[in-house]
Amino acid sequence: MNSKPLFGFSGRFQATKYKLDVDGNPIESTAQVVAPFNTNLIVDNGLNLLRTVDKFAEFCRIGTGTAKPANGDNQLVAQVGATNTAGIGDASGCNLTNGFLWRRFSKRFAAGTIHGKNLSEVAMAPAATGGIFCRALLKDAMGNPLTIVLLADEVLDIVYELRMYLPPVDTVVETTIDGVPTTVTMRRTNNLD
């Protein structure tokens, strides 16, 4: 039996702000990526959530804390907002070359809800309160922590991309199918035809 982990997970965040038109809709031509994709930490609670809940990334939370993420984090340091409103950027796919599947969750913070604050930390979670799935500091393209300050007429979309890496070699596991103990061999393929 293979004792190596079957799968690996990683995640990353991106933040984009938009100006609003007179009807309160985001103007796509004003999109400004204020924090490019940077990695996050899937916390211990998040690893537990992967096996217990379906919607571990239902809400995005944002805050003003600056402490470095740690495995034991279960909240943001200083949460100032939470949303489960869809933004622009939901998608999914696979990267056969590098052996991972990915899914993007986009959540929007409405205009006027978190403006004027020094936004610096972000998390995904199954609810607006309670334990989080992952946590990250917002960072610039060089990986340096940064803060974002929104105007009252701007919305903020946070895109979270979760990646699941598949093992490059056969993985043999024992499982139960219809009450019968069964040995299963899992094999990654690059052929989707």
Image: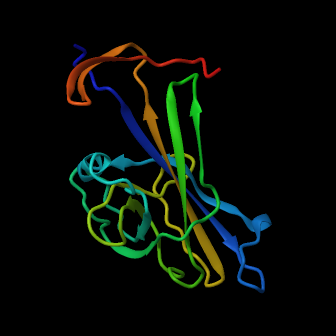
Whether residue 14 is situated above or below residue 169 in the rendered picture: below
In the rendered image, residue 186, in percent from the top left (x then y), is placed at 38, 19
In the rendered image, residue 149, in percent from the top left (x then y), is placed at 55, 74
In the rendered image, residue 80, in percent from the top left (x then y), is placed at 40, 77
Residue at image location 61% in from the left, 85% down from the top = 152
Q: Quadrant of residue 6?
A: top left
Whether residue 182 is situated above or below residue 125 in the rendered picture: above
In the rendered image, residue 82, in percent from the top left (x then y), is placed at 43, 73
Residue at image location 37% in from the left, 53% down from the top = 54
Viewer-proximal residue, 49 or 11?
49
Q: Quadrant of residue 177?
A: top left
Residue at image location 77% in from the left, 80% down from the top = 21
State the scheme by which the image is colored: rainbow
Viewer-proximal residue, 132 or 184?
184
Q: For the image shown, how many numbered marks are present on the structure?
A: 0
Quadrant for the N terminus in the image: top left
Whether residue 5 is situated above or below residue 117 in the rendered picture: above
Quadrant for the C terminus in the image: top right
Residue at image location 54% in from the left, 71% down from the top = 85
Whether residue 107 is situated above or below residue 135 in the rendered picture: below
Q: Going by the image, does 65 lie left or right of 31?
A: left
